[in-house]
Image: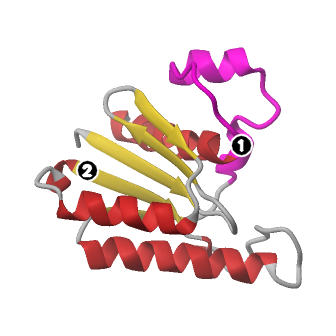
Amino acid sequence: MKKIIAIDPGMHNSGLAVYEGKFTRLEYPNLWQLMEYIHKVGKADYKDDVLFLVENSNLNKNNWHGHSARGGVGKNKAISQEIVNHCKRCGVKLIELPPTGYSKVYAGVRRQFFETDTKWYGKSNEHNRAACAMIMRYINQKLK
């Protein structure tokens, strides 16, 4: 794959990381911006060279992901499923990943460690750092 795009779905915004031999983009788009981006890639002539990695909280029945027991978990699952469905509708290559603590990989670490590990020196937040962790784990597993 020439380009790997990882999405860490969130209730209001999602973490997005784009990797093309190096990280070229980290963003925090809302759902509509994200859907538009997926649609744009789906229509592009380079779409066969792109792989989407999407954390799908529906793949883990014992998932605790969200802001509250009343609504956070269910909303995150619904958003995850909408993103996955949209990727499929747009015909992009997709791997759904179960939640395995991607948000914790770079949580609480010094910025210098994140920069050294990813070679990304721009702005980042916990959500797009989680998307970076998804890509790093995917690449490391492919190398083994």
User: Whole-Å distance between the Cαs marked 1 and 2?
Assistant: 24 Å
For the residue pair 132 and 137, the one nearer the viewer reads as: 132
Residue lying at 69% horizontally and 52% vertically, measured from the top left: 101
Marks 2 and 1: in contact by CB < 8 Å? no
Q: The residue tagged with tag 2: helix, strand or loop?
A: strand
* Residue that label 2 marks: 50
Where is the N terminus found, in terms of image quarters? top left
Q: The residue tagged with tag 1: helix, strand or loop?
A: helix
The three-letter amino acid code for the residue at tag 1 is Glu
Q: Which mark is residue 126?
A: 1
- Is disc 2 surrounded by few (<14), some (14 to 19) or many (20+) residues within 10 Å? many
Magenta stretch: give its range.
101-126
Where is the C terminus found, in terms of image quarters? top left
Q: Is-magenta flag for residue 33?
A: no
Q: Is-magenta flag for residue 122?
A: yes
Residue lying at 23% horizontally and 71% vertically, measured from the top left: 91
